[in-house]
Image: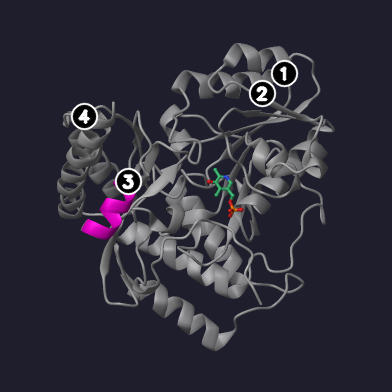
């Protein structure tokens, strides 16, 4: 059977991974500054994580949500403590899109309203309601187009209030840091105003922390830089370090009635064990602090470099925007220097490494990038 093509593929077949490194089937070693798309939080094949999942599977891997599952409580308690969001309640699901889908449903149920405000260059997933509020017409099928989706300019508080004023908005959803859109930061004042205005006009404020959360930004959640508490927070990518799990954190004022949200696979034993192991490692190895430290080092070093590119980001969520297409830079980094990087559009490189990235590993990237950039930018200068 032929496989449905999903992403453009590099001709590389990873067969083994450890920490911040990946090996392909020919034995080539790569430094992973992409984290399999911001998913690998605690590092590949972390021994404590492997042990926890293996032990759990040998006990019980799955039972449905119709019975008690103490692992869900353990996960919720730990997540509350590590994130500093103890007062929220947790709904467990399987992916980011599903987390957002449930967050939107919840906001609409609770407020009795329909409209959702989201932002340009935002991404919230590929399921029906999530894709309708995603600013990418190429992935929105006619069946997903919604009159309830209002996509506004990012960081534009006046435009947001204009729409909120009508009183028919169920939720405003915004990424803690826009990821796929090219690592764009919300202004601190914008988030603080959003909090005030959503309260005033009785809409839910949903922070999509699927990519920016779980310590990546140098805080457990990127919105914590703004000192606010959203009504709903959505999670996925880094939560399971590759094991599929997503979550919705819900403020206590929002009381879902029994049966409002549900799932077959969500919160299963194996997924909970994986997510508990992730939080343990994040805590034991101070990975949030490390993300901030190594992230600052990378940001400062890149900013100090001589070059025609812009650097944006927080922690280990870094974007580099170039005035020319970056396919060549990425290819050279990968095939000449063994370094995986992420991408956004044609001209933005995204760095989303495991949160334990060391200064020495950052230096390996900086040296390689400097060489590749000199090489590639010279070619573009010649062409001009
Ligand atoms: C990846 C991502 C999603 C979708 O998550 P899936 O697990 O792929 O469904 C939603 N929002 C943001 C910000 C993301 O980065």
Which of the two marks, 4 or 3, is nearer to us in this view? 3
Helix, strand or loop for disc 3: helix
* Secondary structure character of the magenta stretch overall: helix
The x, y position of residue 209, in whole percent, is 52, 43
Q: Which residues are magenta?
A: 328-336
Mark 3 lies on residue: 328
Mark 4 lies on residue: 307
Confirm or reject: label 3 Cβ below 8 Å from ligand 1. Answer: no
The x, y position of residue 83, in whole percent, is 46, 47
| Mark 4 in CB contact with mark 2 (< 8 angstroms) | no
* N-term mark: 2 or 3: 2
* N-term mark: 4 or 3: 4
* N-term mark: 1 or 3: 1
**Rendered view: 272 above or below 182:** below
| Mark 1 in CB contact with mark 3 (< 8 angstroms) | no
Residue at far right of view: 112
CA–CA distance in space, label 1 to label 2: 8 Å
CA–CA distance in space, label 2 to label 3: 44 Å
* N-term mark: 1 or 4: 1
Front position in the image: 23 or 207 = 23
Residue at far front of view: 383
Front position in the image: 35 or 374 = 374
| Mark 1 in CB contact with mark 2 (< 8 angstroms) | yes
Mark 1 lies on residue: 164
- Is 258 part of what is drawn in magenta? no
Helix, strand or loop for disc 4: loop
- Marks counted in the figure total 4
Rendered residue at 38%/43% (across/down): 350
Mark 2 lies on residue: 198
Q: Quadrant of residue 246?
A: bottom right
């Amino acid at each position: 059977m032929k496989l449905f093509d999903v992403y453009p593929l590099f001709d590389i077949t990873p067969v083994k991974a450890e920490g911040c490194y990946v090996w392909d089937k020919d034995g080539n070693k790569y430094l992973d500054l992409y984290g399999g798309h911001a998913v690998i939080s605690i590092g590949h094949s972390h021994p404590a994580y492997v042990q926890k999942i293996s032990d759990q599977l040998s006990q019980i891997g799955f039972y449905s949500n119709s019975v008690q599952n103490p692992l869900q409580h353990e996960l919720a308690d730990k997540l509350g403590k590590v994130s500093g969001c103890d007062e929220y309640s947790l709904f467990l699901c399987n992916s980011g899109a599903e987390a957002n889908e449930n967050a939107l449903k919840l906001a609409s149920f609770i407020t009795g309203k329909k409209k959702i405000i989201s932002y340009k260059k935002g991404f919230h997933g590929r399921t029906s309601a999530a894709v309708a509020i995603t600013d990418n017409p190429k992935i929105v099928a006619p069946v997903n187009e919604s009159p309830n989706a209002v996509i506004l300019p990012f960081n534009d508080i006046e435009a947001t209030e204009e729409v909120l004023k009508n009183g028919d908005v169920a939720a405003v959803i915004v990424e803690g840091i826009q990821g796929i859109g090219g690592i764009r930061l919300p202004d601190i004042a914008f988030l603080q105003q959003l909090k005030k205005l959503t309260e005033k006009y009785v809409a839910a404020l949903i922070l999509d922390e699927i990519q920016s959360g779980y310590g990546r930004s140098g805080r457990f959640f990127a919105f914590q830089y703004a000192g606010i508490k959203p009504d709903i927070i959505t999670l996925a990518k880094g939560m399971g370090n590759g094991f599929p799990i997503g979550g919705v954190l819900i403020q206590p004022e929002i009381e879902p009635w029994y049966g409002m949200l549900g799932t077959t696979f969500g919160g299963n034993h194996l997924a909970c064990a994986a997510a508990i192991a992730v939080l343990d490692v994040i805590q034991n190895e101070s990975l949030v602090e490390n993300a901030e430290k190594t992230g600052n080092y990378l940001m400062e070093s890149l900013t100090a470099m001589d070059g025609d590119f812009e650097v944006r980001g927080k922690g280990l969520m870094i974007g580099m925007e170039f005035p020319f297409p970056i396919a060549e830079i990425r290819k050279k980094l990968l095939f000449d220097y063994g370094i995986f990087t992420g991408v956004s559009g044609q001209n933005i490189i995204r760095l989303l490494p495991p949160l334990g990235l060391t200064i020495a590993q950052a230096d390996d990237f900086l040296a390689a990038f400097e060489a590749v950039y000199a090489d590639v930018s010279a070619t573009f200068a010649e062409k001009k």
